[in-house]
Amino acid sequence: MVVVTGIGMVTAIAHNRENTWLQILQGQSGIKFDTALQLPIARIENLDNSSQVSSPQSRAEYLLQTTVLEAIADAHLELPLSDCGIVIGSSRSNQRELELLLDQPQHLAIENYWLYCQSANLSSQIANLLQTQAPVLAPMAACATANWSITQACELIRSGRCNMAIAGATDAAITPLTIAGFQKIGVLANSGVYPFSLEREGFALGEGAATLILESYQSAKQRGCQIYGRILGWGITNDAYHATSPNPNNQMAAIAIKDCLVRSQISPEHVGYINVHGTATTMNDAREAALIQQFFPHSLVSATKGATGHTLGATGMIEAAFCLLALRDRLLPPSIGMQSPAFDIPMIHQTVQSPDLQSALNFSFGFGGQNAIIAFGNID
């Protein structure tokens, strides 16, 4: 059994786990309208040194390290962690620094600046921080990256390669190239984020990172530490259909859900909460609504990107943290930004108490047809 014993998180809502969770339960959002970009975005503000180009870290790495250190402290661990596996995911990685380098070549004069632009630097820097000699992985599956990271970290433990592993994901991709790409395919919101609403028009790009400490139940029990929940199982498939559009027949997404339920040994009626991908785009919300109607007509559902923005590769890790915090507190967060419901599914409008909550699902979907579903359960 693999359990989660530590959580770190930084979002546009707040700079740590508990404040982010408290604010989201109160219906607060970190999305603001940027007058220069003429777009709503979820930028992390007032985080020390996180935006300095001359810093010895990229912005994505700084956000990631902030959450890694918070998760380690939360799990009552201390550095070094020489036997801890590492799985770090990102969609855009250090693209921000590469774009800055193209615009301002003088940054090449900064010592080792080129190193901080490399994609693999995220996982290698965390490996150096922990001084680990365990496996170090760096998956990338677009906006399903975080759920891939969790499953790979879980497999490191289940296979016996280590008793503890860090699963982290980060993205700081509010950049000209990223904005231009998403605008080209028409998925960015112009005024606001309205998930599963008739008014929905797209998502707001966001920055963020989150980290989970995973370990075997035996290790956690021996250490006597808190346990947020356990990883029940997952389902991962690929549509093999289109670079950016999901297959309209939903077949492979449905198989991912079925695989997750079978591996987790739970039935649909026992799923008390689902944090959906919820991009507030016309296509994605309709697709997810059809899946909810097919498999989980009575499970309570919320979409939280109306609070955090869409943090790309980090989004699933932040939402996995929300699932685990929901299991801990028996509280289900609202779908912030939702207006006129567009679908007949049980969306959560205000924070709901759920004293009998036993399990929660995290839905993530990504470009390239990525479908990744993870089930979390309480330790009971």
Image (cartoon, helix red, strand yellow):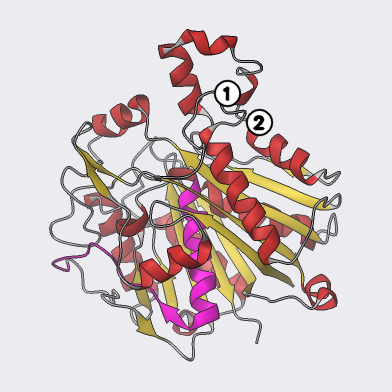
Residues at circles 1 and 2 in contact by the CB criterion of under 8 Å: yes
- Nearer-the-camera pick, 352 or 231: 352
Q: Which residue is under mark 1?
A: 117
Q: Specify the segment rendered in magenta.
A: 314-341
Please state, as top left, top right, bottom left or bottom right, where the N terminus lies in the image: bottom right
Label 1 – label 2 distance at C-alpha? 7 Å
Return the x and y of residue 120 as percentages of the image width and height: 65, 31
Return the x and y of residue 344 as percentages of the image width and height: 21, 74
- In the image, residue 315 above or below residue 299: above
Q: Which secondary structure, mark 1?
A: helix
Q: Is residue 332 left or right of residue 107?
A: left
- In the image, residue 129 above or below residue 349: above
Q: Quadrant of residue 39?
A: top left
Q: Is residue 280 left or right of residue 269?
A: left
Residue at horizontal 25 percent and vertical 50 percent from the top: 281
- In the image, residue 176 above or below residue 68: above
Q: Which secondary structure, mark 2?
A: helix
Is there any visible trace of residue 149 in the rendered image? Answer: no
Residue at horizontal 20 percent and vertical 68 percent from the top: 343
Return the x and y of residue 104 as percentages of the image width and height: 44, 12
